[in-house]
C-alpha cells in the first residue's frame, strides 16, 4: 500500500513538473511567436497584406510608401526583434548592461569608435523621403513593441530586459555597425606597427604589401554573366556575402510590393528596404571592396589642447558600472597604440556628411544609369556592386567614400601633421565596368583599380585564388542555369592548398627524405585532388603546414616568435615567397617546408592521433551554431543549438568557410527563371528558437541548395496576415 501511494505521489509530481514545463514553454516560448494569420488593427492608412511562404519569407503588399515600410518594420520585429535589440546594443556599447562582464571589452571598443554619437549626429540630417521611410519603419517596430510588450521573445524574459522604443537613430546605428564590421584596416595597421619595434623593415614590407595595381583578389563572391553564357539567354547574377556565423544569421528575407516599389532579397533587421536582391528590371549583389578608409596618427593625449574629453559610465549587469573616458582629437578618437602609445583614428564613416538611405532608390532603379545614381551616396562600407538587368546588360560599380591621401606612409602609423586627406575620390572617377567583351564580371573583394590610376590605392585585399577559380569555372561552359550557379557557389576546390600540397611533395622528393611519418603524409598529399572535403585528411595536413609556415615567416620578419600576422593577403605572400625563395629568409626552403609539415603533423596528432590517414578536415573544422542566450538554459539548452557540423570548404575556396565566417546567404537571379530567383540562408528566417523557421534551411544550405523566391507570384501562402486601419 505504501509503495503504491509513493508511486502515485511520484507520478503526480512528475505530472505537475511536466505540466509546469509545458506551461512555461507555452508562456515564454510559443506565446511570443508571430501572429502570422488573421487580421490586426494597426496605424496604417489602407489594408496591408503579409503572406508568408513555406520558408517564412514575408511577401508584403501595401498601397502607400509609409504603409509598406511600416509593415516591413512590424514584420521584421515579429521574427527578429531580439536580434535587433542586440545589434543596437552591440553598436552602442551597451551589451554589458544585459549580459554582464563578458561584454565589457566589446562595449569599450564600440564606445571608443563613438558609433552611438555618430548615429545621433547622422540621424539629425535625415530628411525628405528618407525620413518618411525610416520613421515609418520605426513606427512599425514600435507597434510590435506596443502590442507585444507582455510577450516578447524568450531572451527578454530570461535576461529581464525591457526594450526602449525604436528610433531612426537605431537604424543609422545598425548601418554604422555594418560599416565597422567591414572596415577594420586600423587593426592591421597596429599589428604591422608592432612588428617594426624589433623587426626587419624590408621583410615587413614584403609580408605587408601595399596593393596599388589591378591585381585580382577575392573575398565575398559576386558575379554577373551575359545571356551568351546562360541557357535561358538572359543575364544572370549570383552573390554570397561572407560574414561571421550567428544564429539567427544576419540577413532576413523579404519581398516588398507597393508604392512604386517591387523588390525582393535580403534585408538587415533594423534597417528598411532590400540590401541585396532584385526588382522588375535589375538585380544587384555586393562584396566588400577592402579599400583602406582608416588612418592612425600618433598623438600626445597629455599635451594636445585641441582634444575634447567625453565621459560616461558603462553599466555592467551584476557588477554596477565602470567609468569610461574618451579623448577625441582633431584627427579622431583615441585608441590604445603599440608600446603603450596613444593613436587617433580617422575613419570615413565619422565624416560630417548628411545621411542618405539610398536603398529605396536602389530598390526602384530601372536601368544602369539609375542604378549608378542610387549608389552615389550609398551609406555602406566601400563596396563592389554587381549588376544585371532584364535587357541583358551586366556591370560592376565601385562605390564608397574613398579618401585622397597626401604624404602618407602606407607601412606605418602616421606622425602628427602627416597623411592629410584632401577630400574623396569623385564618384565619377571610381571604376565602372559595363558589358565587358568577356560577357562576365566577377568581384570578390578584389582591387579593381587600374595600374595607372591617378589616386593612391591601398587596402586589406585577399589573394587571387578564389577569383581565379570562379573565372575558370564560369569559362568552362556557355549554358549556365540557376541551379548550376547555385552549385558553383558551393565549390570547395582550393587552388592555393592544392598548389602548396604539390610544393610539399616536391620538397620531400627533392630532399629524398626517409622519415616514414612524413612519407605517409606526403603520399596522401600526392594523391589529393585539392577538394576541401570534411571527410578527407589532406586538407588538414596542408592547413597545418600553411599555418606553421605563416608563423615562421612572421617570426623572421618581426624577429619575434609569437607575433600575429594574418591579413587576407597572406596566402598570396606565402605563394610569392615559396615560388621566389629569396635569400635571407631560410637557409634551405625545402627543409623549412618539411619542417612546417612535420610540426603540423605533431600539432594535429595531439587532436586526432599519430596516424594521419585517420584524420579528417571536418573534425578540425566542426561548426556549432547556437543562440547565445537560450543555449545556456540548464538541461534543455542543447535544443537551442545545431549539432556540431563538420564543414567543407576553407578560406581559399569559393565556398569560403572557416570556424569564424561563411556564406551568410546565397542568391541567384536569372532573368529567364520563372521562379524569379533562388535564395537560401544558413539557418532560417526566424529568431524565435521554437519557431519552425528557426533552422529549417540548414540542411538545404549545407547541401548547396536554395529555394525559389517566387518574385512573380505563385508561392503557396502558408499564413496570411492583414493589417487594417485602426
Image (spheres, rainbow, N blue to C red):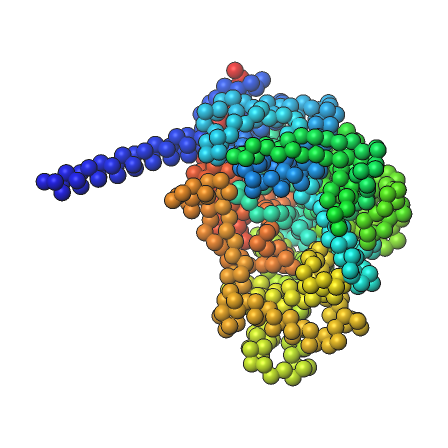
Visible in this render: residue 374? yes
Name the side, left or right, on which 350 lies relative to 514.
right
Closest to the observer: 605 or 250? 605
Tell me the residue at 62%/34% (across/down). Answer: 322
Name the side, left or right, on which 195 lies relative to 517.
right
Closest to the observer: 565 or 273? 565
Q: Quadrant of the N terminus?
A: top left
Residue 501 place in picture, x, y as percent: 64, 71
Visible in this render: residue 206? no
Q: How many marks?
A: 0
Q: Tell me the quarter of the picture where residue 24 sits.
A: top left
Tell me the residue at 61%/37% (across/down). Answer: 90
Tell me the residue at 52%/25% (across/down). Answer: 145
Closest to the observer: 520 or 653? 520
Judged from this view, the residue extending furthest toward the left is 1
Tell me the residue at 80%/55% (across/down). Answer: 211
Residue 115 sits above or below residue 613 on the image: above
Closest to the observer: 19 or 268? 19
Judged from this view, the residue extending furthest toward the top is 726
Residue 311 place in picture, x, y as percent: 70, 30
Residue 193 place in picture, x, y as percent: 77, 53
Amino acid at each position: 500500500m505504501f509503495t503504491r501511494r509513493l508511486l502515485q505521489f511520484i507520478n503526480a509530481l512528475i505530472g505537475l513538473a511536466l505540466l509546469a514545463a509545458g506551461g512555461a514553454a507555452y508562456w515564454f516560448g510559443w506565446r511570443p511567436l508571430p501572429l502570422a494569420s488573421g487580421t490586426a488593427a494597426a496605424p496604417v492608412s489602407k489594408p496591408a497584406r503579409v503572406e508568408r511562404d513555406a520558408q517564412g519569407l514575408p511577401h508584403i503588399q501595401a498601397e502607400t510608401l509609409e504603409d509598406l515600410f511600416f509593415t516591413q518594420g512590424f514584420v521584421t520585429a515579429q521574427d527578429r526583434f531580439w536580434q535587433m535589440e542586440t545589434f543596437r546594443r552591440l553598436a552602442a556599447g551597451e551589451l554589458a548592461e544585459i549580459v554582464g562582464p563578458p561584454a565589457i571589452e566589446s562595449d569599450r571598443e564600440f564606445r571608443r569608435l563613438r558609433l552611438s554619437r555618430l548615429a545621433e549626429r547622422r540621424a539629425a540630417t535625415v530628411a525628405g523621403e528618407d525620413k518618411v521611410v525610416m520613421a515609418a519603419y520605426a513606427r512599425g517596430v514600435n507597434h510590435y513593441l506596443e502590442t507585444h510588450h507582455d510577450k516578447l521573445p524568450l531572451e527578454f524574459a530570461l535576461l529581464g530586459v525591457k526594450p526602449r522604443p525604436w528610433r531612426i537613430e537605431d537604424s543609422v546605428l545598425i548601418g554604422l555597425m555594418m560599416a565597422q564590421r567591414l572596415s577594420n584596416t586600423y587593426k592591421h595597421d597596429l599589428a604591422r606597427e608592432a612588428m617594426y619595434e624589433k623587426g626587419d623593415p624590408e621583410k615587413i614590407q614584403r609580408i605587408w604589401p601595399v596593393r596599388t595595381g589591378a591585381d585580382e583578389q577575392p573575398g565575398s563572391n559576386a558575379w554577373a554573366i551575359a545571356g551568351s553564357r546562360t541557357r535561358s539567354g538572359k543575364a544572370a547574377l549570383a552573390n554570397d556575402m561572407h560574414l561571421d556565423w550567428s544564429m539567427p544569421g544576419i540577413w532576413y528575407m523579404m519581398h516588398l510590393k507597393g508604392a512604386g516599389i517591387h523588390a525582393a532579397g535580403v534585408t538587415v533587421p533594423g534597417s528598411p528596404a532590400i540590401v541585396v536582391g532584385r526588382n522588375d528590371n535589375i538585380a544587384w549583389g555586393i562584396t566588400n571592396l577592402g579599400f583602406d578608409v582608416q588612418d592612425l596618427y600618433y598623438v600626445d593625449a597629455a599635451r594636445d589642447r585641441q582634444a575634447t574629453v567625453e565621459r560616461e559610465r558603462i553599466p555592467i549587469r551584476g557588477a554596477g558600472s565602470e567609468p569610461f573616458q574618451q579623448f577625441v582629437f582633431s584627427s579622431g578618437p583615441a585608441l590604445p597604440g603599440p608600446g603603450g602609445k596613444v593613436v587617433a583614428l580617422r575613419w570615413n564613416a565619422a565624416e560630417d556628411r548628411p545621411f542618405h538611405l539610398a536603398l529605396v532608390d536602389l530598390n526602384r532603379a530601372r536601368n544602369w544609369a539609375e542604378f549608378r545614381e542610387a549608389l552615389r551616396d550609398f551609406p555602406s562600407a566601400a563596396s563592389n556592386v554587381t549588376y544585371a538587368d532584364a535587357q541583358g546588360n551586366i556591370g560592376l560599380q565601385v562605390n564608397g567614400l574613398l579618401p585622397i591621401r597626401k604624404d602618407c606612409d602606407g607601412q606605418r602609423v602616421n606622425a602628427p601633421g602627416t597623411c592629410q586627406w584632401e577630400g574623396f575620390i569623385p564618384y565619377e572617377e571610381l571604376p565602372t565596368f559595363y558589358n565587358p567583351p568577356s560577357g562576365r564580371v566577377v568581384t570578390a573583394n578584389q582591387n579593381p583599380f587600374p595600374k595607372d590610376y591617378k589616386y593612391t590605392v591601398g587596402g586589406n585585399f585577399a589573394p587571387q585564388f578564389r577569383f581565379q577559380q570562379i573565372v575558370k569555372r564560369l569559362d568552362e561552359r556557355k549554358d549556365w542555369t540557376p541551379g548550376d550557379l547555385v552549385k558553383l557557389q558551393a565549390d570547395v576546390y582550393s587552388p592555393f592548398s592544392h598548389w602548396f600540397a604539390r610544393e610539399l611533395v616536391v620538397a620531400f622528393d627533392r630532399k629524398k627524405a626517409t622519415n616514414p611519418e612524413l612519407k605517409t603524409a606526403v603520399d596522401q598529399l600526392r594523391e589529393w585532388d585539392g577538394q576541401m572535403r570534411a571527410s578527407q585528411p589532406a586538407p588538414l595536413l596542408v592547413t597545418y603546414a600553411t599555418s606553421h609556415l605563416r608563423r615562421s615567416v612572421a617570426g623572421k620578419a618581426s624577429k619575434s616568435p609569437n607575433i600575429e600576422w594574418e591579413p587576407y593577403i597572406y596566402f598570396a605572400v606565402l605563394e610569392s615567397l615559396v615560388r621566389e625563395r629569396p635569400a635571407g629568409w631560410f637557409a634551405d626552403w625545402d627543409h623549412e617546408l618539411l619542417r612546417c609539415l612535420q610540426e603540423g603533423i605533431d600539432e594535429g596528432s595531439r587532436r586526432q592521433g599519430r596516424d594521419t590517414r585517420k584524420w579528417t578536415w571536418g573534425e578540425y573544422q566542426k561548426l556549432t551554431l547556437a543562440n547565445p542566450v537560450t543555449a545556456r538554459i540548464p538541461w534543455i539548452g542543447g535544443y537551442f543549438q545545431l549539432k556540431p557540423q563538420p564543414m567543407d570548404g576553407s578560406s581559399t575556396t569559393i565556398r569560403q568557410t572557416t570556424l569564424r565566417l561563411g556564406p551568410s546567404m546565397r542568391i541567384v537571379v536569372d532573368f529567364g527563371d520563372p521562379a524569379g530567383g533562388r535564395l537560401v540562408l544558413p539557418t532560417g528566417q526566424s529568431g524565435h528558437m521554437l519557431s519552425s523557421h528557426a533552422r529549417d534551411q540548414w540542411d538545404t544550405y549545407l547541401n548547396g541548395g536554395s529555394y525559389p523566391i517566387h518574385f512573380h507570384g505563385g508561392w503557396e501562402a502558408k499564413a496570411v496576415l492583414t493589417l487594417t486601419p485602426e
